[in-house]
Amino acid sequence: MSRVGCAYSAGSTMLLATRRIGLLVAIAASCAATLACRGSEPSAGGTLARIRERGEIVWAGDIQGGEPYVFEDPKSPGRLIGFEVEIMDALARHLGVKARFAHHNWSNLVPSLERGDFDVAVNGLEATTERQARLLLSRPYFIYAETLAVREGSPYRSLDDLAGKRVGTLNQTYAYELLRARPIELVLYEGVEEPYLDLVRGRIDAVLIDNIIADRYGCSTKGVHCLPDEGARGTYVVGIRKSDAELKRAIDQGLAAMAAGGELRTILERWHLWDSRQNDPMPQASQNPTAVRRSFDASHWKRFIAAALVTLQLSILAYLIAMPIGLLLAVARVYGRLPARFLARVYIEIFRGTPVLLQLYVLYYGLAPYYALGPVEAATLGLGLNYAAYEAEVYRGALLAVPNGQAEAAQSLGMGAWETLRHVLLPQALRLALPAMTNDFVALLKDSSLVSAITVIELTKRMTITAVDLRGWLIPGLACAALYFAMSYPLSELARWLERRLTRDSRPRAL
């Protein structure tokens, strides 16, 4: 081809590339504009008008909170009941619409409300300073007290006695704000029953939670003693977006009418929630909250690095459990007799066929009546046993990939079965399995985020706690991703180096 032809071809290619880039930019701009328009809807106000136009108000909560807030009717599966369900149904009638529930994770209620995923948040939402700064808070509909629970026979009688001790509570609650200002080791939970189970087993020293939860899940539990003094008082409110002042006025009027007409008291009495505190004047949320604005700084980096070390430690220890067990399972499946092959396959199918989160719950809570593992021990053992099943299949495939001639050659040299396996087959199989082993370890590093369900604060859990405190997910999320990458990438490079070394091939290649 001539130079002119080459130049023409190159120019055409560049023109085509430019057009494609322009098209992609246009699409991206269009998507961004669409998202911007959608994102502007929640902040534009007019939610009350839209509620009345569609004939329903969508409120969100977390079913995991359980009785008496919002939960599934045991007598009629699929039907939701609870005192907040009845309050929202009554409030919807005052607004002239119907109420519809939307399930959302408790930790994400406030950011999801701000996104516009639903109209209001109602789920034991407490009137904290942080929430007052982010949301409009309705007239309170319930006054609660913080209840401190300890083990029977414990010498602790107040929060002042618990300095340096492990105290459990729920994340993003008023109790959490009270505890994190004290010199105690804070243990966070997602469920309402788990803190008291850990208290009885001696994993924590005390629990501070709203009296509604304490009365139902803690104080009646054998081995738990609820102290009579109130830790502090607070109120439950309806969370509303900052832009929906008109909706707030309508909700306040509806709650006031329910209180004046006795409807609110009737609902609370039906759920055995009415007490002397409800006769006191309902405190109003501050109209000019002064929340402290925080930014991601060096102290957060220190906490993130400490949490990353926890993640790395858990992953390494779990993998050290998974490797030998997986190797034994693989050898049993390939070379074992029928009973050994059967038992190995049963193990592999059970641990691969059930969620690792379920296995962690069984180890931590299910076995607690017989042997109470600590959270780190349960997390390490659970991840190790789970990944042993996956490693077993990796090693089995690698063993089957070794040519039969290798075993025959070893036998011709007079090696026994064990010597052949140890000196000939396993070294070659491990070399073949190395890429998959590296991939599994990186996957284990990420799956370690599940252990936060059993109170271990690893990297991902630290990120969510920080994101809530800072009222933003982008910077904590990027910091979390950077630390995960900083841990996984060197391991991948080390595995590539080992693979090149074991293959005795110095040529650079993409492995």
Image (cartoon, rainbow, N blue to C red):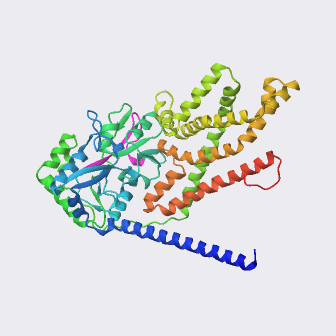
Vertically, is 10 above or below 291? Answer: below
**Image point (54%, 52%), residue name:** 459
Vertically, is 400 above or below 376? Answer: above
Give how far across and how far down residue 446 sits, in percent. 57, 48
Give how far across and how far down residue 195 sits, in percent. 41, 40
Vertically, is 309 above or below 411? Answer: below
Horizontal placement of 443 versus 47: left or right? right
**Image point (53%, 47%), residue name:** 449
Observer able to see residue 31: yes
Residue farthest to the bottom, as pictured = 4
All told, the count of numbered labels is 0
Horizontal placement of 106 versus 277: left or right? right
Residue farthest to the left, as pictured = 261
Who is closer to the viewer here, 227 or 51?
51
- Indicate yes or no whether the magenta region holds residue 63: no
Give how far across and how far down residue 247 sits, in percent. 23, 63
Residue 37: image quadrant is bottom left
- Looking at the rendered image, the quarter that the N terminus falls into is bottom right
Vertically, is 411 above or below 73? Answer: above
Residue farthest to the right, as pictured = 413
Q: Look at the image and give the residue range highlighted in magenta.
A: 142-160
Horizontal placement of 163 versus 254: left or right? right
Who is closer to the viewer here, 331 or 232?
331
Give how far across and how far down residue 451 sits, in percent. 52, 43
Who is closer to the viewer here, 52 or 25?
25
Horizontal placement of 126 versus 189: left or right? left
Observer able to see residue 236: no
